Image (cartoon, helix red, strand yellow):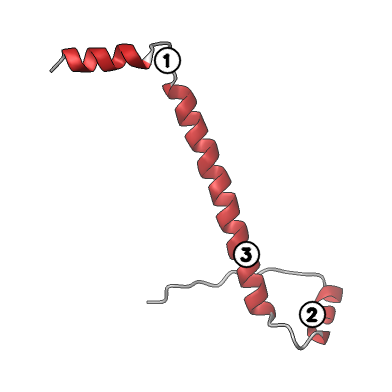
Amino acid sequence: MSTKSVYSIRIPTKFRKIMDEMEDVNWQEEIREVTLELIKEKNKKRLLKESKEIRKAMENDIESAALIREDRDAR
C-alpha cells in the first residue's frame, strides 16, 4: 500500500507553456514543496485558533491560589 496519493490541479495553458519552456526546473518537486509548506502553515493556524477557543472556554474568575489551596486541602 502506498503512503502517497495523487492530487491534480488545472492551470491555464499559457502558464503550462511557460513551465515547459523552463526545462531546468523540476516542477513536480517545486509544487510539492510549496504545497507541503502551505499545508503545514494552514494547519498550524487552525490548531492555534482551536487552542485559543479552548483556552477562552476554560477561563474563569477563580484565582489560581484559591485552586491550589483547594487542591492541597483535599489531600
Q: Residue at x 55, y 72 (%)?
A: 6
- Where in the figure is residue 34, as x and y percent of width and height? 65, 66
Instruction: State the image quarter where residue 12 is shown.
Output: bottom right
Q: Nearer the viewer, mark 2 or mark 1?
A: 1
Q: Which residue is mark 3?
A: 35
Toward the left, the furthest residue is 75
Looking at the rendered structure, which numbered label has been put on residue 9?
Answer: none
- Secondary structure, mark 2, is helix
- Where in the figure is residue 38, as x and y percent of width and height? 62, 58
Q: Residue at x 22, y 17 (%)?
A: 71
Separation of residues labelled 1 and 3 (CA atoms): 40 Å
The answer to which of 53 and 8 lies nearer the viewer is 53
Q: Which residue is mark 2?
A: 19
Instruction: State the image quarter where residue 58 is shown.
Output: top left
Amino acid carrying label 2: it is: Met
Separation of residues labelled 2 and 3 (CA atoms): 17 Å
Mark earlier in primary sequence (2, 3): 2
Q: For the C terminus, give its image quadrant.
A: top left
Amino acid carrying label 1: it is: Asn
Q: Which residue is mark 1?
A: 60
Mark earlier in primary sequence (1, 3): 3
Q: Residues within 10 Å of mark 2 (few under 14, many from 20)?
A: some
Rendered position, 47 above or below 52: below
Q: Residue at x 51, y 32 (%)?
A: 52
The answer to which of 34 and 63 lies nearer the viewer is 63
- Secondary structure, mark 3, is helix
